[in-house]
Amino acid sequence: MALNRDLFQDNFNQSNEKEMSNAEIINKRRVINGYDDGLMQISPLKHPWAYDIFNLMIKNTWVPGEVPLQEDVNMWNDPDALTDNERRVYERSLAFVSNLDGLQTNNLACNIIRHLTSPEVILAVTRQTYEEALHVQSYANMVEALALDPDTIYGMYRRDQELYEKNQTVLKAVSNISDPMFKTGTFESDQRFLEASIGNVILEGIYFYSAFLIFYVLKRNGKMPGSAEMIQFINRDEDLHCRLFTHISNGIISEQPELWTEEFQERIIKNFRDAVDMEYNWGVSCIREGILGLTPETLRQYLEFVGDYRLAGMGLPKQYNVENPFPWIDEYTQGNMIEVNFFEGTVREYQSGSLEW
Ligand SMILES: [Fe+2]
Ligand SMILES: [Fe+2]
């Protein structure tokens, strides 16, 4: 309930709000189902983790237009620089991530924000929505720079059954709450919101990962380095988004522990396992028997490793207990797995927050 329609209904002298103290208002604050006047008072905070993440997001500010793509353009236009298979894998990966970020922009704006009742959480998810819009722009920049046929990329899902079904599954998982009549406030609907919120952990933390891996494998082999750099910036954002939704979900669980039943936890574990399977199937449909040393087996192991990491974030038991088969990926994605900012030193101009006139 980002805008509280029940407020400002009475005339001033009859309004009940006069009786409420500020401390009372902050104490009543909840991630969902809390008291919220819709006026975004973010000092003091009830959910400081959300404000911390919001500040980290600001520090990570970047602009897609500044990522150089000229080397990629040269390679794409050089018939010997990439094999047909590598081109196909590139286009499929780009098609999927662009669909996913487009979908997520709308999901946050239309499905999620309206049910949140903590101003600092709304602030962070609003910033996240803006970042998803930046990601949408990033892919458009790649399509334009390489002069790809927009229909090949954006329209691929209409002709490719695997992509169609992957989008369909992702959309279903996050649209569980998209009915305009859906409201939180009952055990059943709150569990449904929580499941959708954890669906966002899965979306941000698993569904991107075969495509990210493919871009990094290409770069590691000297191919399409600008695209991989763009993906690194996006990946760093997605890492914070995943962290934000892990906090949102854990926040709801700590405020409404009755929702977190054993049966529900089993369902969530199954959702994570299904997501790893689906991401694997999608990844294999891209790389087929393998590309540049990335095989179906190592892809599977990597996704299992990532899945376990996300499960652990939700306090759920690891399901696979495997090592990361690509330790080198840390140099690209360290921000994903550990709290180290691997971009330190490369984007100082944005990190400083200073303006030059
Ligand atoms: Fe994104
Ligand atoms: Fe995201």
Image (cartoon, rainbow, N blue to C red):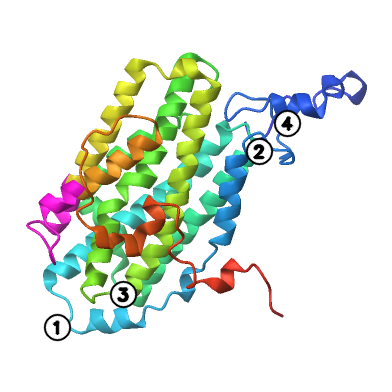
Q: CA distance from mark 1 to mark 2?
A: 53 Å
Along the viewing direction, whichever of 148 and 29 lies nearer the viewer: 29
Is 131 displayed left or right of 281 in the figure? right
Q: Are marks 3 and 4 in contact (CB under 8 Å)?
A: no
Q: Position of residue 70 (x, y in %)?
A: 35, 82
Q: Are marks 3 and 2 in contact (CB under 8 Å)?
A: no
Quarter of the N terminus within the rendering = top right
Q: Are marks 1 and 2 in contact (CB under 8 Å)?
A: no
Disc on the earlier residue, 1 or 3: 1
* Residue located beneath label 4 in the image: 37
> Which label is found at residue 214?
none
* Residue located beneath label 1 in the image: 80
Mark 1 vs mark 2, foreground winner is 2
Furthest residue in direction left, as rendered: 289
> Which label is found at residue 119?
2
At 29% across and 45% down in the image, what residue appears?
Answer: 306
Is 120 displayed left or right of 327 in the figure? right
Q: Amino acid at mark 3?
A: Pro
Q: Position of residue 289 (x, y in %)?
A: 6, 57
